[in-house]
Amino acid sequence: MIGPDNIQVYVVMGTVDMRKSIDGLSLLVSEQLALDAFAGHMFAFTNRKRNVVKLLYWQRNGFCLWMKRLEKDKFRWPESREEVLNIGPRELRWLLEGLDIHQKQAHGALHYSTLC
């Protein structure tokens, strides 16, 4: 997986011009979303056709930009009234694999406690 397992992922709602690269996307994060692009969080963007996803994140001493383009089909980008949706790395993997993250069809983690 891209980035550390405990990274916070911010899915940016709406569409973004995919001609934007690191400078344009980091400026969008800091100015339009009022978030810290240097905090080590990952920011996910998509285009109007929803066939391209770009991931932007800061890693120690520079920005990383990752892109995935589907040759067929579309990403199931979540719908929200918020500007940005905070998800975890597991939901990001689902999104990149084509699953709808709101349906949460995967099995959840079990938590047990011991009785003394």
Image (spheres, grey):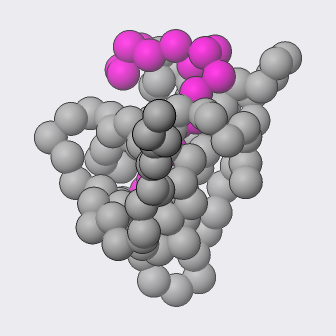
- Residue 17 visible in image: no
Asked if residue 100 lies in the magenta stretch, the reply is: no
Give the quadrant of the N terminus.
bottom right
Q: Position of residue 85 (x, y in %)?
A: 33, 39
Residue 11 appears in view: yes
Q: Give the image quarter of residue 62.
A: top right
Please indicate whether residue 114 sits to the left or right of residue 58 in the image. left
Residues in magenta, as a range: 31-47
* In this view, 113 is above or below 29: below
Residue furthest to the right in view is: 61
- Residue drawn where x is 59% and y is 82% of the image: 71
Q: Nearer the viewer, residue 15 or 56?
A: 56
Q: Residue at x 38, y 36 (%)?
A: 86
Above or below for 82 versus 32 = below
Q: Is residue 52 left or right of residue 50?
A: right
Rendered location of residue 93, percent (x, y): 56, 60
Q: Is residue 54 left or right of residue 83?
A: right
Does 47 sit above or below residue 45?
Answer: below
**Which residue is pictured at 66% across the width and 55% down the height?**
67
Percent coordinates x, y for residue 61 in the rendering: 84, 17
The image quadrant of residue 102 is: bottom left
x, y (%) of residue 34?
38, 13
Q: How many marks?
A: 0
Q: Is residue 81 shown left or right of residue 20?
A: left
Q: What is the residue that sits farthest to the bottom in this orientation?
A: 72
Is 112 or 40 nearer to us in this picture?
112
At a point 53% along the width and 32% down the height, the residue shown is: 8
